[in-house]
Image (tube, rainbow, N blue to C red):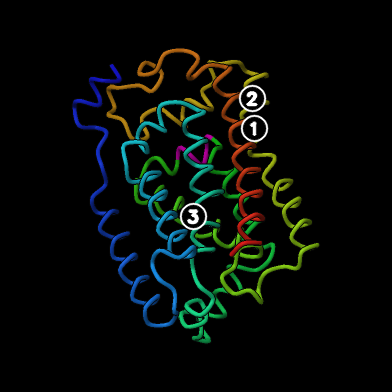
Amino acid sequence: MFWDVLLAGQLVWNTQLLIVLICIGIVYTFFIHRFTTLKLYHKQPLLFFLGLGFLYLTIGSPLYNISHLSFSLHMIQMSILYFIIPPIILFGIPESICNQVFEMQRLKKIMKLLFSAKMALYVFAVLFLLYHLPVVLNILSQSPYLQNGYLLLLFILSFGMWWPIASPDLKQRLCKGCMKRYGFLNGLILMPACLLFILTAFIDGGNNPFFAQITAHLCMPSQSSSFTLLPPPFNTKFDQIMAGIFMLGLHKFGLVMTFTLEKKV
């Protein structure tokens, strides 16, 4: 049945998003030539384009549709989107470009509010947890625009969450000791969302309507079900446990990667 859906054209590439990302890449290239002495093969431009590439593969390629077929694939997709891509893109923005873009006073006030040291982290963690609650998910699933807007807000907040340790503006990065404490707080605040899958799997087992609402019918046709497209161990108790483990692991990987890049960029 999985191949029937694939051949039916349900798993497609998002050309509109590709055009938008190409335009962003062109604007970025202009700023690189206008405000810096960097070449496109230098480290920061490569990181920025790598981030755009990961972004397209995560939400613009058939991998996006496939990620909704099981709990673990869904959490891998979301973890890459929110824990890996934002710091890579931020490290790819030179400080001179950041200063040029954010020199407007109104924009500075918005950035200060949205990208404050802890505000974005707390708001992101709450909204991320709420997104996986049945009541919220039922409301969001009624309107693709509402759901996409919610996910876009999470994506914007994820940049604010990583801003204190990956900001292009070196003056806005936390000190070394504060970075470690912020990294610990980051993991602690997001822990409830990570443990949600694991605990619920042990309590309710594999046939859990809570998680059925997460994966079923979000991007597949109404006559298909994510539970019949993939064989076990997908969409079982084991799959729910692995979803939480994957999220914990990718978040930890994101922190380690960010601290490593912070020393080199």
Which numbered tag is attached to residue 173?
none
Camera-near label (2 vs 3) is 3
Secondary structure under badge 3? helix
> In the image, is 120 to the left or to the right of 21?
right
Magenta-drawn segment: 134-138
**Residue denoted by label 3:** 155
Residues at circles 1 and 2 in contact by the CB criterion of under 8 Å: yes
In the displayed structure image, the side of residue 99 where residue 196 appears, left or right: right
Q: Amino acid at mark 3?
A: Phe
Q: Nearer the viewer, residue 114 or 53?
A: 53
The residues tagged by marks 1 and 2 sit, at their Cα atoms, a distance apart of 6 Å
Q: Residue at x 56, y 37 (%)?
A: 133
Which of the marked residues, 2 or 3, is nearer the chain's N terminus? 3
Circle on res. 196? 1
Residue under the point 76% across and 68% down: 175
As shown in the figure, which amino acid type bears the numbered disc 1?
Leu
- Residue 135: say if magenta: yes
Q: CA distance from mark 2 to mark 3?
A: 26 Å
Q: Is residue 99 magenta?
A: no
Vertical side of 214 occupied by 229: above or below: above
Q: Position of residue 201 (x, y in %)?
A: 62, 21
Circle number at residue 200: 2
Residue closest to the eye, 142 or 233: 233
* Numbered circles on residues, count: 3
